[in-house]
Image (cartoon, grey):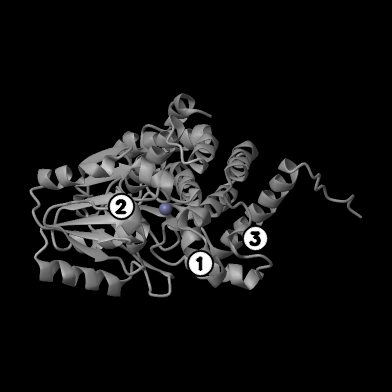
């Protein structure tokens, strides 16, 4: 179903006039009648500016000037030194990122910013570098510019950081209530990175519409702090349609190092549409399954968006989406090269007890899985993952031309 049809079917009455709700322990929505609480406000959050294009990074100095910065601290991924070349940003102090967005690393970079008297923070790199830059800039009340060098997540535009422990296991979300002042996306740099990052970003972006759609039904405030606006739900749907329509063409072009209109569209979907869609539309089961999966060592070699892709298929199984819709998603993942089965994310031959660990972690209090419009228990998550895995393997066999049909039952 494309955007126009979907908009017609959307429940437009939800955000503005819904009763404000609060989730109790069983996941039921309880009406808030105490203290004269009014209808839940809708909130839409976005960065101050979004600049995307070939060579866009050359405008970084201008963006800093616009913010009145004379002594920015540039936090960059050390592996990018050659790719970035001389950025020639006047008065800048450069700090190499330590590799993990952990509380220790955030404190270290914040200490440097204080010592150097930095008046702005620039984060240049992948999702973890970006999230660290946010966690340094916002508490210090410093202007922030984000320059993603890969399009592997929708982290650049949002106001939150995902914090991991030093071993790479998910630890917490940190919310800052402020979005970056500018996001500068140089598509030439992004296409110069391994294509796997772009594909992972597509995996992250695929979840946005389904999670916003599910969580809008519960009227639970999204990360932006209120119920979803129509704008957020529409951008989330546009993200999904853009990825399905241009994802494969973008992959093929990016593999050749080509910046085509399809590549530009997919980078915008991965970064801007997905970023605005998730932050103001809400997360749900797909990201909780991702967070749960990080509890298993085998998944640590896979990117956020790759695990989110599998989490999205699991979520669709959990909420009993129509078969055609699930198959459309799974087939697209296979076509573009995203995980559809447990074996694709380092969990070949995984035991049920291990999946129970994943499900328990996905269902802890505060997880976005409780934004689903029904109560979710860990056993349901295990079964959804197993069902997603079975369907993913089945569709792969079918697309590969192998008929993997069950024998006659005896
Ligand atoms: Zn994500």
Q: Is residue 193 left or right of residue 138?
A: right
Looking at the rendered structure, the secondary structure element under dot 1 is helix
Looking at the rendered structure, the secondary structure element under dot 2 is helix
Up-down relation of residue 62 to residue 81 (above or below):
above
Q: Picture quarter containing residue 325? A: top right
Q: Picture quarter containing residue 101? A: bottom left
Residue 215, percent across and down? 41, 47
How far apart in space, not on screen, are marks 2 and 3 (Cα)?
36 Å
* Residue, disc 3: 343
Q: Picture quarter containing residue 128? A: bottom left
Q: Residue at x 60, y 49 (%)?
A: 317
Q: Is residue 225 left or right of residue 318?
A: left
- Image quarter (top left, top right, bottom left or bottom right) of the C terminus: bottom right
Q: Nearer the viewer, residue 38 or 295?
A: 295
Q: Is residue 42 visible?
A: no
Near mark 2 (Cα within 10 A), the count class, few <14, some 14-19 or many ≥20, is: some
Mark 3 in CB contact with mark 1 (< 8 angstroms): no
How far apart in space, not on screen, are marks 3 and 1 (Cα)?
13 Å
What label does residue 84 carry, if any?
Answer: 2
- Answer with mark 3 or mark 1, whichever residue precedes in sequence: 1
- Answer with mark 2 or mark 3, whichever residue precedes in sequence: 2
Residue placed furthest toward the right: 410
Q: Residue at x 47, y 37 (%)?
A: 240
What label does residue 300 carry, if any?
Answer: 1
How far apart in space, not on screen, are marks 1 and 2 (Cα)?
27 Å
Q: Is residue 369 left or right of residue 220?
A: right
Q: Is residue 333 visible?
A: yes
Up-down relation of residue 19 to residue 388 (above or below):
above
Residue 365, percent across and down? 41, 66
Mark 2 in CB contact with mark 3 (< 8 angstroms): no
Looking at the rendered structure, the secondary structure element under dot 3 is helix
Q: Residue at x 58, y 60 (%)?
A: 345
């Amino acid at each position: 179903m494309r955007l126009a049809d979907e908009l017609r079917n959307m429940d437009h009455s939800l955000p503005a006039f819904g009763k404000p709700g609060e989730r109790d322990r069983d996941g039921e929505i309880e009406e808030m009648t105490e203290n004269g609480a009014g209808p839940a406000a809708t909130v839409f959050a976005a960065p101050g500016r979004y600049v995307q294009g070939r060579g866009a990074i050359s405008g970084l100095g201008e963006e800093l000037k616009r913010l009145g910065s004379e002594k920015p601290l540039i936090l960059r991924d050390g592996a990018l030194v050659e790719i970035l070349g001389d950025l020639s940003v006047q008065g800048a102090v450069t700090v190499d990122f330590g590799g993990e967005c952990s509380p220790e690393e955030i404190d270290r970079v914040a200490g440097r910013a204080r010592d150097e008297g930095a008046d702005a923070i620039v984060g240049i790199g992948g999702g973890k570098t970006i999230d660290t830059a946010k966690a340094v800039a916002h508490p210090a009340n410093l202007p922030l510019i984000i320059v993603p060098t890969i399009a592997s997540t929708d982290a650049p535009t949002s106001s939150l950081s995902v914090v991991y422990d030093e071993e790479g296991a998910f630890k917490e979300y940190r919310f800052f209530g402020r979005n970056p002042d500018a996001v500068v996306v140089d598509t030439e740099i992004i296409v110069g990175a391994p294509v796997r990052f772009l594909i992972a970003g597509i995996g992250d972006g695929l979840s946005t519409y389904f999670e916003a759609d599910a969580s809008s039904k519960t009227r639970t405030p999204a990360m932006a702090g209120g119920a979803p606006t129509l704008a957020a739900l529409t951008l989330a749907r546009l993200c999904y349609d853009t990825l399905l329509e241009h994802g494969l063409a973008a992959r093929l072009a990016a593999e050749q190092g080509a910046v085509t209109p399809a590549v530009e569209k997919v980078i915008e979907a991965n970064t801007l549409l997905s970023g605005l869609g998730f932050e103001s539309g809400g997360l749900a089961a797909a990201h909780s399954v991702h967070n749960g999966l990080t509890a298993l060592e085998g998944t640590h070699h896979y990117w956020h968006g790759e695990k989110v892709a599998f989490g999205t298929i699991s979520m669709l199984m959990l909420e009993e989406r129509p078969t055609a819709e699930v198959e459309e998603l799974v087939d697209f993942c296979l076509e573009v090269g995203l995980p559809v089965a447990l074996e694709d994310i380092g969990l070949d031959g995984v035991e049920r007890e291990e999946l129970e660990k994943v499900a328990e972690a996905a269902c802890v209090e505060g997880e976005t899985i409780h934004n689903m419009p029904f109560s979710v228990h860990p056993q349901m998550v295990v079964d959804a993952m197993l069902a997603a895995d079975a369907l993913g393997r089945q569709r792969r066999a079918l697309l590969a031309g192998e008929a993997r049909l069950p024998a006659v039952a005896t």
